[in-house]
């Protein structure tokens, strides 16, 4: 079996520039000579990803990913990762090139699973769990009161964990605390509450937020700092009174290992930026340091499904992120998005990743 074709799709929902909820998609389709088709996704700028996949072969350090993959055996994705890493060395080794590699890696694992007739998680290791506890992510409103109303709606929809954050959090400690207090008051003591700082602070300001938010029993405070501020994360995790989560913007194992080594207890892996090959190795190293992984899923169901395969086998996981907001492009592309039932989402059991975009929607 060999790879016959690799194609990328850059999709945008018209009229949604700046909108929340993934109104764009960067998809990769890999086809084999005997007709298997695998799909991957990158949460990144779709046109940039398409260029990295479809750029021509220039030389052994400057090649589009398709030119590196066509003709190769797709059934051992981990063996193709170093080939993609070296072939993109002159423009890659981080950022968008890694994100494009992640999309190809997901499509390769999809094919490997289909070729073996098993769900991808069976190829990744021992299955440790068949379902994961869900939390729902939703943006804050403009005021604490409006945010509390969103939170009550989510609880009424059956979610037992809720994450809100980003702006207007940031400039004013009193107002930040007012948002968190309003959310805890709205959801009551038994619903998990997670706060996303959205890279808003430096270490001293983050430590002040940790102290102010401590009475509101947060499951974690997410991304209080910029992802490259590992010294700041070390300061906050050593002195701070609560669990810190970070990593969603990272695409290399080097960046994520640095956060884990700095004491970040919950490492957020966006599988559509990291890929399953890197993600699996990372999950083992994080667990060996006493940490846990969790998915970061902002865009589409392919990301969620691929994440579930990793989290089915990872040694230590914490919850599972789903987006609570409507996503019209995602709903059209992936009508069979897994849904949370009674606070849990099931690990897929079909061969491969078990999900592909709807052909009519794609067209
Ligand atoms: Mg976040």
Image (tube, grey):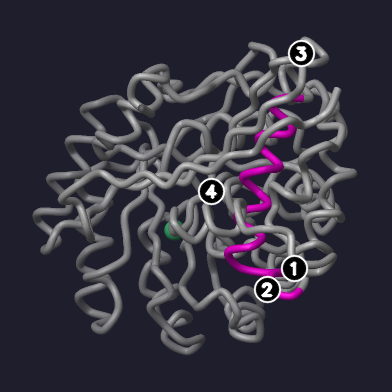
- Sequence-first tag of 2 and 3: 2
Badge number at residue 238: none
- Residue wearing tag 2: 91
- Mark 4 crowdedness (10 Å alpha carbons): few <14, some 14-19, many ≥20: many
Q: Nearer the viewer, mark 1 or mark 4?
A: 1
Give me the C-alpha separation between circle 1 and circle 4: 20 Å
Q: Which percent across, then down, holds residue 320?
A: 52, 37
Image quadrant in which you'd find residue 178: bottom left
Magenta segment, which residues?
A: 90-111
Image quadrant in which you'd find residue 18: bottom left
Give me the C-alpha separation between circle 4 and circle 2: 17 Å
Q: Which percent across, then down, holds residue 15?
A: 15, 50
Residue 44 vertical position relative to residue 301 in the rendered view, above or below: below
- Residue wearing tag 1: 62
- Sequence-first tag of 1 and 2: 1
User: Which image quarter holds the C terminus?
Assistant: top left
- Residue wearing tag 4: 42
């Amino acid at each position: 079996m060999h790879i016959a074709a690799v194609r990328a799709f850059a999709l945008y929902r018209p009229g949604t520039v700046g909108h929340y909820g993934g109104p764009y998609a960067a998809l990769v389709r890999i086809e084999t000579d005997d007709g298997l088709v695998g799909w991957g996704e990158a949460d990144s700028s779709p046109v940039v990803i398409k260029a990295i996949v479809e750029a021509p072969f220039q030389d052994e350090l400057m090649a589009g990913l398709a030119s590196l993959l066509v003709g190769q055996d797709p059934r051992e994705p981990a063996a193709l990762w170093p080939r993609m890493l070296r072939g993109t060395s002159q423009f890659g080794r981080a950022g968008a090139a890694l994100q494009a590699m992640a999309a190809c890696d997901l499509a390769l694992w999809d094919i490997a699973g289909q070729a073996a007739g098993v769900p991808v998680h069976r190829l990744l290791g021992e299955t440790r769990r068949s379902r994961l506890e869900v939390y729902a992510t939703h943006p804050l409103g403009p005021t604490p009161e409006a945010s509390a109303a969103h939170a009550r709606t989510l609880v009424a929809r059956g979610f037992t964990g809720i994450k809100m954050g980003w702006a207007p959090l940031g400039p004013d400690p009193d107002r930040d605390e007012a948002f968190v207090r309003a959310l805890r008051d709205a959801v009551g003591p038994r619903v998990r509450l997670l706060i996303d700082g959205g890279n808003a602070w430096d270490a001293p300001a983050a430590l002040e937020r940790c102290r102010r938010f401590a009475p509101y029993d947060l499951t974690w405070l997410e991304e209080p700092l910029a992802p490259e501020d590992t010294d700041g994360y070390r300061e906050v995790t050593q002195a701070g009174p609560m669990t810190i989560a970070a990593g969603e913007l990272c695409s290399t194992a080097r960046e994520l290992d640095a956060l884990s080594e700095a004491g970040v207890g919950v490492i957020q892996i966006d599988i559509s930026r990291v890929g399953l090959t890197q993600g699996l190795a990372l999950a083992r190293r994080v667990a060996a340091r006493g940490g846990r992984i969790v998915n970061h899923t902002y865009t589409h169901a392919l990301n969620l499904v691929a994440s579930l395969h990793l989290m089915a086998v990872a040694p230590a996981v914490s919850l599972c992120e789903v987006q609570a907001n409507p996503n019209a492009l995602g709903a059209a592309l992936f009508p069979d998005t897994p849904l949370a039932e009674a606070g849990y989402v099931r690990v897929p059991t079909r061969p491969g990743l078990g999900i592909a975009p709807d052909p009519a929607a794609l067209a």
